[in-house]
Image (tube, grey):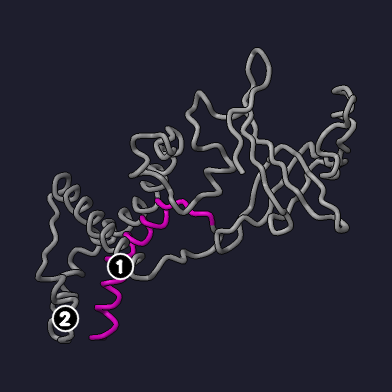
Amino acid sequence: MNVALPAIIVFLLLLPGFIFRTRLKRADRTSLDFSPFGQIAAEAVLWAILAHLFWLTISYVLFRYRVEPIVLIKLLSSAPASQVEATNEVAKNTRWISAYFISLLLASFSIPTMIRSLISRFRLDRLASPFSSVFRFHEAPWYYLLTGADFSHEEAPDFIVVSAIVEVAKEAVLYVGVLDEFVVDSGGQLDRLVLQGVVRRPIENDKPKPGSDHTDDVDRFYKIDGDSFVLRYSEAITLNVQYVKLTADGVIADRASE
């Protein structure tokens, strides 16, 4: 008991910080965080301290409940007598302590989720934003490249065109399509792109023949039948991303990135 109880107490105290940190971050990965453990622990401890200070302040202002540091110290003590005495004190306020931790854990999950949603909604994290240094998700480069999140609401693209060169039977083939979605692997590397309205042509037909008119430009591409085309990033030689915005006068490409 004198070993397990302090470990459980420390776990409960730090758990809100780990939850808050996880929900606030946006990263291009589908598995656990691969950040150095020291960084994870430091950030989680910091968020846990801030969360407890905030929640304790609310508890005192609204309900006049306040923490007794001496009870917490006795719970973390290795002396069985001190632990028993502190446990009895905790038992007298079981309802309040349970409500405190349950509400704090729920808040640690929901509040950062809402914060992240607001950051993305108002595009406070885009590169040109004055708040970029604070709110930008630096571990999500594919998110910014393939969603157009770096544009303001007025300049946001209506769709994104992806062009990729893939080697097929020792021949370079250019595939062009509208990006529908993208998937990253467990390490945060781009795994595959799902495209729609895909056309292709051999790269050797990159330019129209001399003397040909513009109708030949269309004939150089071959439409691929199907609703969705899955392109594996590992098989692409080059990748071009073009942001396209529809206007009343026609179609303009805001920016292209390779």
Q: Are marks 2 and 1 in contact (CB under 8 Å)?
A: no
Give amino acid for label 2: Ser
Residue drawn at point x = 19 percent, y = 63 percent: 93
Q: Which residues are magenta?
A: 1-28
Circle 1: element type: helix
- Tell me the quarter of the picture where residue 145 sits: top right
Q: Residue at x 23, y 86 (%)?
A: 2
Q: Amino acid at mark 1?
A: Leu
Instruction: Name the one closer to the observer, 161 or 208.
Output: 208
Mark 1 crowd level (few <14, some 14–19, many ≥20, 10 Å Cα) = some
Q: Which residue is mark 1?
A: 12
The overriding secondary structure of the stretch rendered in magenta is helix
Circle nearer the N terminus (2, 1): 1
The quarter holding residue 251 reads top right
Residue sitting at the far front: 210
- Residue 252 percent across, percent down from the top left: 64, 23
Give the labeled residue for mark 2.
77
Rendering coords of residue 203 (x, y %): 82, 44
Q: How many marks?
A: 2
- Is 44 a magenta residue? no
Quadrant of the drawing holding the N terminus: bottom left
- Is residue 14 left or right of 196 when viewed as pictured? left
Secondary structure at badge 2 equals loop
Crowding at dot 2, Cα within 10 Å, few <14 / some 14-19 / many 20+, comes out as some
**102 or 27: which is nearer to us?**
27
Nearer to the camera, 12 or 84: 12
Q: Position of residue 141 (x, y in %)?
A: 51, 49
